[in-house]
Amino acid sequence: MNNKFHIITFGCQMNVYDSEVLKGILSQKGYSATSKPEDANLIIVNTCSVREHAEVRAIGRLNELSRHKLENPEVKLAVIGCMAQRLGERFLKEVPTLDLVLGTEELFKLPDYLEKKGKSPTVALSFSELQKIDSLPQRKNKFSSFVAISRGCENFCSYCIVPYVRGSEKNRKLSEIIKEVQCLTEYGCKEVALIGQNVNSYKDNGCDFAELLKEVSKTDIQRIRFMTSHPKDLSLKLIEAMSELEKVCEHLHLPLQSGSDKILEKMNRKYNSSDYLRLMDSVRGKVDNLSLTTDLIVGFPGEKEEDFQKTLEMVQRIEFDSAFMFKYSPREGTTAFLLKDDVPNEVKLERLQMLIELQKKIAQKKNKSLIGKTEEVLIDGKSKRDKSSWKGKGRSNKTVIIPKGEKDENLLGEIVKIKIADTDSFTLFGEIIKKR
Ligand code: SAH
Ligand code: SF4
Ligand code: F3S
């Protein structure tokens, strides 16, 4: 029997991580991964529901795969993750060829469902408890790995589907997280990114996120990142931990979402623009060379021109290193869905374009000011554009390209110090001045 599987992943880091965990589980059960869907007997699509666009792309891909399955009836087709959780049985109407629809926790039991004879297709959506997992995740990036510290979210930002598809926040045990990090280092991993929808609210038996960072710092891992932080839970204690712990990178992803207090309130974000500015001053005051990144939404219901101008003003004032910028997408089931989606699509697009332009200029200016300075880079591969150049991530989380020069030496997985020679809005270019 052909035991090959192929996983296609949409969505955020949590989905990337879940796919890695599932790969580990399937490998332990005797399945083997293939990069070619046409060679696989089991095709899995891990889905995202955060915006309509992500769902449309997943459906498109599933329709293609359905045609493949009709020609190869032995192929099993599974849809897992957030969109599977959201649609459940309804998914079978959209894509009738599906064998399995597994939600955001049930997905880890995929091999059990495959082995179970009888009722097909199967839909399983329970997500009240964390699944116990014994196998090692199979990592995409050997040197920098995601480690989930919590799952779910209970902040209920009014636009967001995540609390509905991932359930309430469930924290992993500190001991389990430390074990996973230590184990990664034994396989050559240099950096971990601790992930959760809101890492700042982590709690295990009285241990909070700042203490978790301290504990992770005591392992053999060399660099630590984390995301995402919610401004309402960013404590002074965490800021201090960031500044004191050498292994923790000077990068903070702190979604602002909007610069207008009226919109922030309607979004149920629980902070206003002055709170955000105060936080920013406090972090920048404590953490040298901080790289600050954010998420922004344009066209939320009721967003007037003056509200959008406030977003532009905040972006101008704060000068983020980079930003993910989105058009508001109404999500059925959220409280904002009940509001009239009254910003016309052309206006949303226009605002998004203006915001992207402004942010690009800011990033260009900020990056230019780094020329001549140094940055510590973890090298994780070759540049896609120029195969003779090394590529990696700086502590700032910026992509760094190190053109040629050292081409004969294998620098994969090395942490090096570079001098920044040139920049554009997304990338730094530099020469190695020191190897660790
Ligand atoms: N937990 C994280 C990120 C969640 S989703 C946080 O709280 O920041 C990632 C980003 O997608 C969000 O920060 C938000 O900017 C965006 N997003 C979420 N729902 C959206 C929607 N309905 N329309 C447009 N963007 C959305
Ligand atoms: Fe969504 Fe808000 Fe939770 Fe982030 S904090 S996942 S935006 S509800
Ligand atoms: Fe999408 Fe689910 Fe992540 S909705 S953004 S894949 S938590």
Image: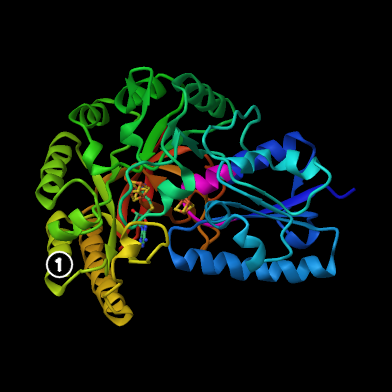
Instruction: Locate the C terminus and report the quarter of the image it occupies.
Output: top left
Task: Count numbered badges in the picture.
Answer: 1
> Which residue is drawn at the image coordinates 41% and 62% (left, top)?
331
Majority secondary structure in the magenta region: helix
The residue singled out by tag 1 in the image is 307
- Does residue 247 appear left or right of residue 136 in this picture? left
The 10 Å Cα crowd at callout 1, few under 14, some 14 to 19, many 20 or more, is many
18 horizontally vs 260: left or right: right
Q: Which residues lie in the magenta part?
A: 9-18
Q: Who is closer to the viewer here, 429 or 281?
A: 281
Q: Is residue 154 magenta?
A: no
Looking at the image, residue 188 sits to the left or right of residue 101; the answer is: left
Residue 284 location, x and y as percent? 16, 41
From this view, report whether residue 230 is shown above or below residue 335: above
Q: Residue at x 17, y 63 (%)?
A: 311
Look at the image and tell me whether residue 392 can be seen. no
Query: Residue 339: x and y, percent?
Result: 29, 66
Residue 106 placed where, x, y %?
Answer: 62, 41
